[in-house]
Image (spheres, rainbow, N blue to C red):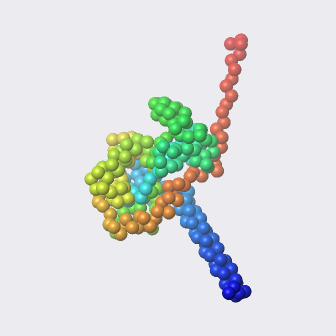
Amino acid sequence: MVTKKNIAAKENNNEIMSLQQQMMNDAEKQLSEATTGGTSNTLSTRAKRFSLGDLDLGNELSAVILDSVFENTYYDRAYSQDEAVPPACFAINPVSGDMAPHEDSPAPQADTCAECPMNEWESAATGKGKACANKRRLALYAYDDDGMQTEEMVQIRISPTGLKRYNAYVKNVVAKLGRPSYGVVTKLAFDEKQSYPTLTFECEKPISDEEIQQVFDSRKLVEAMLSEGYDTTSYEPQKVRPTRKKSKMS
């Protein structure tokens, strides 16, 4: 028998479920915001040293590579150490064949990266390289004598010069241990024969089953970090000077 009391109880339950759903939505939003706080969680490799902000971590780093995505970045002006500018166009995707300009790209160069002229060889201002840099972005947990440090997740980018080395490393770990990158401790260092900071990778040991479970528990954090775009609020369109027409008298 349907009574006013039953109806009120049902409405109350619906309201509670609605509030719980809202709490879950807000929790997901805050999780993403907490993980995508700009560049403070990005490891620098300048001068062949790992650093996080003002913290110098040395020239070697043990870590667990949680996951990775492909990243393409095109800058429409020359690099300046004194002035950090965002890329004019960038793409982030876990699948290399599906790369396309991110929705936050201030100046998309094409509909997809596959058809972009800036992603072609010999498109760079000098040399035979690409104007658009093809990189990999990795999410890491540091690893020391106390095990995997899950208090802070960081990210690092592999430059185009280090991509082949990273791909070979992953294949080697799979072939020898039957594990993905997150199943082992990796030592990251630098190739001293290269003038540009080029990363090297060496497998130190497998991680424990408990640590693998911790990696799985961090999936949402990993996804949020690796899908983070660039802050393009400071981007200003490149000013192109009009070409002067030659005088007929010249």
Establish if 150 lies above or below 71.
Answer: below
Residue 92 in the image: state x and y as whole percent.
52, 49
Relative side of 124 to 63, left or right: right
Nearer-the-camera pick, 72 or 242: 72
Quadrant of the image containing the N terminus = bottom right
Total marks placed:
0
Relative side of 242 to 86, left or right: right
Residue 89 in the image: state x and y as whole percent.
58, 43
Residue 230 in the image: state x and y as whole percent.
57, 51
Report whether residue 47 is seen.
Answer: no
Nearer-the-camera pick, 65 or 149: 65
Nearer-the-camera pick, 169 or 84: 169
Q: Residue at x 63, y 71 (%)?
A: 22
Q: Looking at the image, which residue sits at the far top?
A: 249
Q: Residue at x 53, y 62 (%)?
A: 35
Q: Residue at x 61, y 49 (%)?
A: 104
Q: In the figure, residue 10 lies in which quadrant?
A: bottom right
Report whether residue 93 is seen.
Answer: yes
Residue 5 in the image: state x and y as whole percent.
70, 88
Q: In the figure, residue 101 lies in which quadrant?
A: top right
Nearer-the-camera pick, 213 or 88: 213
Quadrant of the image containing the C terminus = top right
Q: Residue at x 64, y 38 (%)?
A: 238
Establish if 6 lies above or below 227.
Answer: below
Q: Looking at the image, which residue sits at the far left?
A: 176
Relative side of 88 to 5, left or right: left
